[in-house]
Amino acid sequence: MAAKRLLQKLAISSVVFVTGTGVLGPLGAQQSVNTNLELWVGPECVIAASSSTSVPQPDAYSGKITFNYKIRTSKTGGGGSIDLAFMGPDLSGATLAYTAALQGRGTAQWAGEAPVAGARTAIATFGSNSHSGKDGDTGTVFWSLKNYRGAPPAVQLSTSCR
């Protein structure tokens, strides 16, 4: 929010009034000079889960996460993702299936069963010059973790932008 206020203040052109004699004319004459200021604002990624459910099943867990996100990627060479990760005592042999839906910017991803292996999985991606709405956008991911017999896994959402 502070960066937005700074941007608004800096976006206003400055006006300089000059008085005097000589090149500018007689004493008391005024002349205005406009200057422009360029400001680079970097990428931004923020995510917050607004609700999460997890349902145990024999040898599996499934769940739904609803989230809010804000993104701003660079015009050139920018991009980003929303990532889903699972942490548990023994994820070897476990498989993940998921479907994401976005009500805003980005491309939602889905996957059939694939090994979890503790890695982050991109559930949504963003291209160059992508911007969420002023108040952010929302999304949902439905997930199913199969062939897993451990304690309920910890589920984490994160973002990355450039």
Image (cartoon, rainbow, N blue to C red):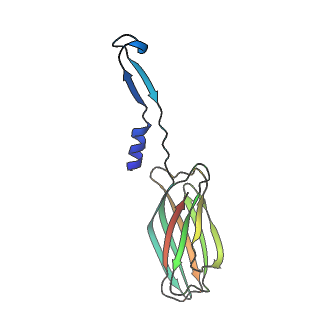
Front-most of 146 and 82?
82
Residue 139, horizontal then vertical, whole percent: 52, 62
Tell me: residue 37, above or below residue 117: above
Residue lying farthest to the top in this orientation: 26
Tell me: residue 53, above or below residue 109: below
Residue 137, horizontal then vertical, whole percent: 50, 56
Residue lying farthest to the left in this orientation: 28
For residue 111, side relative to residue 158 (left or right):
right
Residue name at image x 56 percent, y 54 percent: 105
Residue name at image x 41 percent, y 48 percent: 3
Which quadrant holds residue 103?
Answer: bottom right
Q: How many marks overall?
A: 0
Residue name at image x 40 percent, y 13 percent: 22
For residue 27, side relative to residue 51 (left or right):
left
Quarter of the image where the C terminus is located = bottom right
Residue lying farthest to the front in this orientation: 22
Residue name at image x 41 percent, y 40 percent: 8
Residue 142, horizontal then vertical, whole percent: 55, 71
Residue 4, horizontal then vertical, whole percent: 41, 46
Tell me: residue 44, above or below residue 16: below
Front-most of 103 and 39?
39
